[in-house]
Image (tube, rainbow, N blue to C red):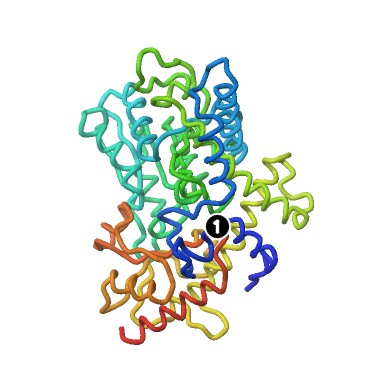
């Protein structure tokens, strides 16, 4: 295993960018493995948010300096997100309070085009923020059906034949997670895009869980909309939606009468939060910095992109390769430490074949025989590992007949030493299982 994709010096520099990477607010050393619930905030994002709160606290669209600066900060934030996603323009980027609010806003706008005879196709491993808005349309008579593609429960991947069978000439919306927040499974988005486009359906991507783990290119994906949250990408709360220009202009979201009637602002409820845009730019600046550190390893790679967009693709590709090695260590162990797959009484939900880890993000949900999930989480915390047990708002748990699972989720500031701490703690937990 190659843990030196980030050499020791670079990993230390990365961790130093996160004020709470090594210790919590009380100074306690711990491994933070609850990133699927929300990543730690990078210092750049926190500082940028605070500065914008003070320096640009005036409302937008005024003639005075604080207001004009707020407009500038918002545009800079939109541009940073557009570069991260390879969107055509900053005008393709909409901000929102949360992914849930953006999905509801999108569903309401789409409902105006529906007759009640159409269906939407989702999957059994969606987060409920990407289920409830479409179910509400069904309950309101705007959709006839909401169909869920089956999981292959033994490996936690989509049954693609079943998914294909659910998409027909009445399908108007295909809305799919880029990766399951419970199982870590990545969806084959380009294949699903082709299915959606064959019947003229909107193709919507929930990238909330995946955005921190690998490159995203909305042009290559060919999606109509894509949603992610800042607090899953090293920034504070707040979420962002990419939309194709023609859809953002043609669809009619709910808004107050005096609000602008042009995209992206017609999609944004209330006054735009300049500090939110400053913070997400700070997170993108961090990823750009990381790309600059490793750019020399890539030669002419990613040369279809240029400038910051190329640097960001390099950064996210490096993150993906580094996290792949961490995933292998978690499941298979290393240096004499038994991995999760080797521990007695542990059931991992999702892919466990390391040869297929390119199909998953570094998120692992599991249960320990004869141990409650809350007990496992408590035992891990006593050993200095922050994890979580709940349902994660994921439909996947219903497929497995479980109310909760234990979950760990890693990101690029996590280290192999932290994986070792986790595995040692799990070995102790399982000794009495």
| Left or right of 389 in this view: 265 | right
- Check disc 1 and report the residue beneath it: 19
Name the quarter where the N terminus is drawn: bottom right
| Residue at x-position 54% and y-position 35% | 52
Q: Quadrant of residue 366?
A: bottom left
Q: Judge left or right: residue 94 versus residue 89.
A: left
For the point 26% across and 73% down, the residue is 372
Viewer-proximal residue, 25 or 408? 25
Q: Is residue 285 above or below residue 335?
A: above
Quadrant of the rendering where the C terminus is positioned:
bottom left
Which residue is outermost to the top?
258
Q: Nearer the viewer, residue 77 or 365?
A: 77
In this rendered view, identify the residue nearer to me: 214 or 420. Answer: 420
Which quadrant would residue 80 be assigned to in this image?
top right
For disc 1, the neighbor class at 10 Å (few under 14, some 14 to 19, many from 20) is some
Q: Residue at x 70, y 43 (%)?
A: 310
Q: Position of residue 106 (x, y in %)?
A: 38, 30
Residue 142 % position (x, y): 26, 28
- Residue at 43% x, 37% y is 204
Q: What element carries label 1?
A: loop
In the rendered image, residue 27, in percent from the top left (x then y), is placed at: 48, 66
Q: How many marks?
A: 1
- Horizontal and vertical percent position of residue 18: 56, 56
């Amino acid at each position: 295993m190659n843990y030196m994709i980030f050499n020791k010096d670079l990993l230390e520099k990365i961790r130093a960018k996160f004020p709470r990477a090594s210790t919590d607010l009380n100074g306690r050393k711990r491994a933070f493995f609850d990133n699927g619930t929300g990543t730690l905030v990078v210092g750049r994002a926190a500082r940028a948010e605070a500065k914008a709160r003070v320096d640009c606290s005036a409302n937008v669209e005024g003639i005075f300096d604080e207001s004009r600066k707020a407009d500038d900060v918002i545009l800079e934030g939109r541009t940073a997100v557009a570069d991260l996603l390879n969107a055509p323009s900053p005008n393709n980027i909409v901000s929102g309070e949360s992914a849930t609010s953006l999905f509801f806003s999108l569903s309401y706008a789409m409902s105006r085009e529906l007759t009640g005879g159409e269906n939407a196709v989702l999957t059994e491993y969606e987060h409920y923020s990407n289920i409830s808005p479409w179910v509400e349309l069904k309950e309101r008579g705007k959709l006839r059906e909401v169909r869920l593609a089956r999981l292959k429960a033994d490996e936690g991947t989509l049954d693609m034949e079943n998914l294909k069978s659910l998409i027909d000439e009445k399908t108007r919306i295909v809305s799919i997670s880029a990766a399951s927040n419970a199982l870590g499974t990545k969806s084959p988005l380009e294949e699903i895009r082709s299915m959606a486009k064959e019947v003229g359906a909107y193709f919507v991507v929930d990238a909330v869980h995946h955005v921190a783990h690998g490159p995203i290119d909305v042009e290559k994906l060919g999606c109509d909309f894509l949603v992610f949250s800042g607090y899953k990408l090293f920034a504070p709360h707040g979420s962002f939606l990419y939309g194709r220009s023609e859809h953002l202009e043609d669809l009619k979201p709910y808004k107050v009468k005096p609000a602008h009637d042009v995209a992206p602002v017609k999609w944004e409820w209330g006054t735009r939060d300049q500090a939110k845009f400053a913070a997400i730019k700070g997170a993108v600046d961090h990823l750009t910095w990381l790309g600059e550190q490793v750019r020399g390893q890539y030669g002419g790679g990613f040369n279809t992109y240029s400038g910051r967009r190329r640097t960001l693709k390099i950064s996210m590709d490096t993150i993906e390769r580094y996290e792949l090695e961490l995933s292998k260590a978690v499941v298979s162990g290393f240096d004499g430490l038994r991995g999760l797959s080797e521990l007695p009484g542990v059931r991992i939900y999702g892919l466990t074949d390391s040869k297929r880890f390119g199909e998953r993000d570094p998120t692992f949900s599991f249960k320990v025989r004869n141990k409650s999930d809350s007990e496992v989480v408590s035992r891990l915390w006593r050993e200095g590992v922050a994890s979580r047990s709940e349902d994660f708002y994921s439909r996947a748990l219903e497929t497995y007949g479980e109310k909760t699972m234990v979950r760990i989720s890693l990101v690029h500031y996590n280290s192999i030493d932290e994986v070792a701490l986790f595995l040692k703690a799990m070995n102790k937990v399982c000794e009495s299982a």
